[in-house]
Amino acid sequence: MSDAKIEIRGLSKSYSTGHGSLLAIDTVDLTLAEGEFVSIVGPSGCGKSTLLYVVGGFLSADGDVLVDGTPIRGPGTDRGIVFQDYALFPWLTVRRNILFGLERRDVPQAERDAVADRLIGVIGLKGFEHRYPRELSGGMRQRVAIARTMACDPAVLLLDEPFGALDAQTREMMQDELLRIWLDTRKTVLMITHDVSEAVYLSNRICIMSARPGRIVEEFSVDLDRTLPREELVVSEPFNRLRNAVWLSVRRQAVAAAHADPG
Ligand SMILES: Nc1ncnc2c1ncn2[C@@H]1O[C@H](COP(=O)(O)OP(=O)(O)OP(=O)(O)O)[C@@H](O)[C@H]1O
């Protein structure tokens, strides 16, 4: 039996636009093993978000996406997604935002309270649980968005540039938090990022997407010593060697994108 958690087979997606059909991704094949953390890096507009939304079940496409060997048919509680722009419910408090998914399921109140208390602690927002999103900073909102996804305990996390809008310090704290959660739970993660260091720091594997139409053109395995503290790891020779190799690969695609026909 295969230990593939997610299998993406021959996935292509076209959008119809005012100028005809636009091929966003072209026959993408990608398999994520159970517990793997895979990042996708590529030039702007190459189809990364499109790929993630198809895997999330929010967009239909040609080809197959299988989770545990079964084709997906729309969004599901097995896949939790974190969007770039938080997408919190403005009329709900931090606590109610985090519990949103559980309230719609038949989860006993005591269990829900325990989940909320634990996650509010994990994201460092004790004392803020009854605040509304508008009363929080961007970093705090994104922590709530991640906690809301984690509350439902999905087997697969789909992350669309989850830290893209954060300041550098909060971003590092959130990366460390995500790494800790992943090391604890070994969820299968598919993350999109523009930040090469972030991809190297967090992933097992990095896939480079070509300029649109997006295809996976290169892959890098990441085999770094996760026991090292961040400050040692990020200045280590293996980290920097890999970061440079990934950066060069992305740059090649970005240059190709800059010269591509915009249609
Ligand atoms: N709903 C849509 N209708 C038409 N075209 C779309 C739609 N959504 C995306 N596109 C186009 O599809 C291509 C891929 O978009 P997508 O957002 O997936 O790229 P991306 O790699 O995530 O970009 P970025 O890194 O800038 O966020 C782009 O050319 C975009 O303009």
Image (cartoon, rainbow, N blue to C red):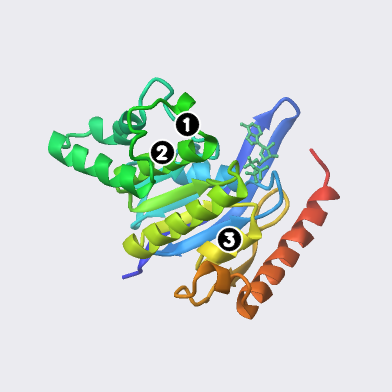
Compared with residue 195, is residue 222 higher up or lower down, i.e. above or below? below
Who's the residue at 44% across and 60% down the image?
Answer: 179
112 on left or right of 93: left
Q: What element carries label 3?
A: helix
Q: In this view, does 74 lie above or below 35?
A: above
Q: Which callout, 1 or 3, points at the residue further toward the start of the chain?
A: 1
- Residue drawn 70% across the image and 56% down it: 210
- The x and y percentages for residue 74 are 40, 38
Give how far apart the Cα atoms at labels 2 and 3 are. 22 Å
Q: Mark 1 points at which residue?
A: 136
Task: Select label 2 or label 1 by which is in front.
Answer: 1
**Which residue: 43% across, 23% down?**
90
Alpha carbon distance from label 1 to label 3: 27 Å
Disc 2 vs disc 1: Cβ atoms closer than 8 Å? yes
Distance Cα–Cα, label 2 vs label 1: 10 Å
Q: Is residue 236 at least partly visible in the picture?
A: yes
Question: Which quadrant of the figure contains the N terminus?
Answer: bottom left
Q: Residue furthest front?
A: 127
Q: Earlier in the sequence, mark 2 or mark 1?
A: 1
* Tag 2: amino acid: Val
